[in-house]
């Protein structure tokens, strides 16, 4: 069931918040040992929050009233550990909610627990050597992408009505793709990063991974907006993303990046994208080939900026306890240590 | 810029000066990374039009 459908059933009184939460807790207990999407399940807290939600008068209930959500374990949920799937932060208890979690709770959402991630969100596999890999529910011998792999895994296995992920270099989009579900990387500055473990200030953003585009819109509408705790956020009005879906894609002009189809693309992927293009055109959108400047070098530019920023964030731990990192993450961070400062500025 | 000139010894000393003690496996990974990224960086710098300046050097129009 989609988040939108569950929210509607909750509002209609067809299901109670406690029933919704218990249903997900039962499913997590049954399935999570096979996929390792959740690193922590806050069952008692979630049931208590659901009971409290039921006491809220109907006219004071938010858009996500009673909706159970999972949160990537780099985003603080007050009272729960924020481990970032790392040994270094294994016992790190969040003193307060991150801004996004506080906003979700204000909208009525209930937090089920914390979701697996690539260690420190610094990789695309979600194979933490400290907490174990998240496995793809479609085939548990395969990875589920990353770094928000636990979020993608939880949605693909129906272990939450919606989730939050974070994205610095594809970490929402990749697991959404691998899980066959929806994910949205908002523009940087649209959603507050306050209360999350940073990777790279230039690129980090929190966003939804959910079952449908409408579900992503429902979550984004609640978490977007400026925040005094995060000066990088924009002080701009937040559009009603859900209402914005009502017109469909009719009349939209969509750019198709031509360079992406000229080399290095799997024929099956290209064919699938072409099918999507045909579908969008059939629904009234205009799809045009575009050739943005520097597309071929975007990956290099991204690394020149992201890796030094990530290395700077981890410098103290790289000095004091390098052995506590997984080998892949430590090597990635050290790459940032060795890049010259001029490379960072060129990247910008 | 030839990344091959970045020997383990050079990289280890550079790391030590920053208070970091990488393993040989770390240095091998870094060496591979630099071997790939530095020529790409050089290509990028050559490809940049003369009027493109880093974001930090842009002066807002009066």
Image (spheres, rainbow, N blue to C red):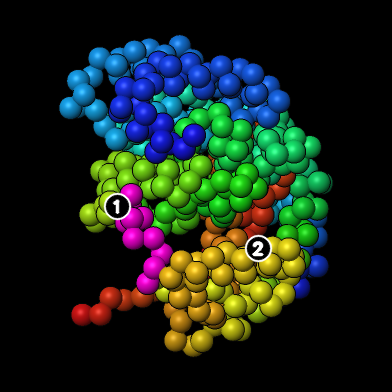
Residue drawn 33% across the image and 49% down it: A242
Instruction: Give the image location of residue A348, x and y in percent.
Output: 48, 68
Q: Earlier in the sequence, mark 2 or mark 1?
A: 1
Mark 2 vs mark 1, CA separation in Å: 28 Å
Q: Which residue is mark 1?
A: A243
Residue A31 part of the magenta-drawn span: no
- The x and y percentages for residue A213 are 45, 50
Question: For this rendering, which residue is in front, B30 or A11?
Answer: A11
Where residue B60 appears, x then y in whole percent? 28, 75
Q: Which residue is mark 2?
A: A272
State left or right for residue A81 relative to residue A227. Answer: right
Is most of the magenta stretch helix, strand or loop?
loop
Residue range (magenta): A241-251
Residue A28 drawn above or below residue B6: above
Q: Tag 2, which secondary structure?
A: helix
Residue B12 appears in view: yes
């Amino acid at each position: 069931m989609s988040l939108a459908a569950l929210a509607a059933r909750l509002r209609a009184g067809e299901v109670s918040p406690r029933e919704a939460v218990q249903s997900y807790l039962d499913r997590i207990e049954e399935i999570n040992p096979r996929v390792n999407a959740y690193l922590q399940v806050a069952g008692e807290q979630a049931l208590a929050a659901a009971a409290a939600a039921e006491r809220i008068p109907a006219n004071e209930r938010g858009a996500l009233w009673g909706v159970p959500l999972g949160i990537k374990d780099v985003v603080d949920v007050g009272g729960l550990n924020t481990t970032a799937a790392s040994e270094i932060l294994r016992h790190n208890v969040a003193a307060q909610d991150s801004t996004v979690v506080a906003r979700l709770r204000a909208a009525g959402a209930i937090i089920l627990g914390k979701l697996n991630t690539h260690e420190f969100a610094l990789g695309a596999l979600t194979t933490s050597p400290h907490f174990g890999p998240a496995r793809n529910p479609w085939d548990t011998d395969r990875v589920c992408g990353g770094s928000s792999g636990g979020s993608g895994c939880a949605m693909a296995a129906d272990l939450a009505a919606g989730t939050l992920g974070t994205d610095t270099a594809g970490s929402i989009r990749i697991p959404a793709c691998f899980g066959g579900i929806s994910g949205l990387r908002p523009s940087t500055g649209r959603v507050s990063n306050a209360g999350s473990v940073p990777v790279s200030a230039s690129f980090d953003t929190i966003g939804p991974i959910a079952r449908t585009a409408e579900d992503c819109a429902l979550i984004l509408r609640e978490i977007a907006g400026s925040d005094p705790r995060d000066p990088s956020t924009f002080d701009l009005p937040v559009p009603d993303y859900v209402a914005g879906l009502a017109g469909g894609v009719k009349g939209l002009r969509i750019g198709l990046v031509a360079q992406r189809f000229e080399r290095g693309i799997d024929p099956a992927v290209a064919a699938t994208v072409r099918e999507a293009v045909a579908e969008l055109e059939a629904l009234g959108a205009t799809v045009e080939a575009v050739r943005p400047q520097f597309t071929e070098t975007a990956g290099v530019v991204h690394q020149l900026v992201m890796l030094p920023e990530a290395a700077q964030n981890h410098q103290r731990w790289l000095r004091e306890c390098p052995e506590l990192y997984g080998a892949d993450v430590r090597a990635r961070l050290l790459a940032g240590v060795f890049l010259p400062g001029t490379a960072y500025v060129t990247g910008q | 810029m030839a990344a091959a000139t970045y020997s383990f010894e050079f990289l280890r000393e550079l790391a030590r000066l920053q208070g970091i003690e990488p393993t040989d496996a770390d240095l091998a990974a870094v060496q591979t990374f630099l071997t790939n990224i530095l020529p790409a960086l050089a290509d990028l710098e050559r490809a940049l039009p003369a009027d493109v300046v880093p974001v930090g050097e842009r002066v807002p129009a009066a």
